Amino acid sequence: MSWNEEDVTLVPLAWLKPHEEIKEKNRDKLLEMTKRWGGYTKPLLVDKQTGTILDGHHRHSIAVLLNLKQVPALCVDYLNDERINVSVWPGCGRDSLTKNEVIEMALSGQCFPPKTSRHTLSDHSPPIFVPLATLESFADFSSSDVL
């Protein structure tokens, strides 16, 4: 089974929980590109149970800077989805990382340093386009929308 555009949903920015810090230089480059495009072209990858951001920390940071209310996300059953694997980036200072450790960090309100977790997907996220104007307003949402 692969993901497609219908699997992407808009989720409230306030629901999301980062587990990793960002590199501001990378965020600033992506911010300029996002403004130029006028929207998001890739969804965040998020655990549907906890709101933990698995991939898309820079896109999340951009949404905060732009004061967006919601962002496009592919919400997954992280702990049970075998299509999603986690390892560590070389030179991050860790030998390994588990999915549970990623969730625990996000729920703690703290973050790993940038480029600690490395998520790999057997299926790629679908290409999308969601205009910034759509993300500036808030749609009704409950966590049951992604369960």
Image: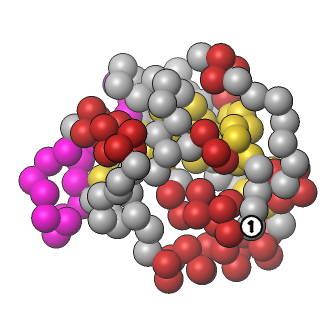
Badge 1: how crowded within 10 Å, few (<14), some, or many (20+)?
Answer: some
Task: Identify the residue at the far front of this view.
Answer: 109
| Quadrant position of residue 36 | bottom right
- 65 relative position to 135: left or right: left
Residue 145 to residue 129: above or below: above
Looking at the rendered structure, the secondary structure element under dot 1 is loop
Residue 41 visible, this angle: yes
> Residue 93 colored magenta?
yes
Q: Which residue is drawn at 66% across and 74% down?
A: 31
Its colouring scheme is: secondary structure
Choose between 111 and 6: the one closer to the eye.
Answer: 111
Q: Locate residue 19, reporting x and y percent.
A: 39, 50
* Residue 127 visible from this viewpoint: no
Within the image, what quadrant is residue 72 found in? top right
Residue placed under numbered mark 1 in the picture: 66
Residue ID at (41%, 29%)? 78
**Residue 49: percent from the left, percent from the top?**
49, 24
Q: Where does the C terminus fall, quadrant-wise?
A: top right
Residue sitting farthest toward the left = 95
Percent from the top left, x then y, of residue 134? Answer: 88, 50
Is 131 rendered above or below residue 139? below
Rendered residue at 78%/73% (across/down): 35
- Under mark 1, the amino acid is Leu
* Rendering coords of residue 81 (x, y %): 39, 23
Tell me where the magenta segment starts and ends, as one range.
Answer: 82-97
The quadrant holding residue 107 is top left
Majority secondary structure in the magenta region: loop
Compared across the picture, whether 69 is left or right of 111 comes to right
- The one nearer the camera, 144 or 94, is 144
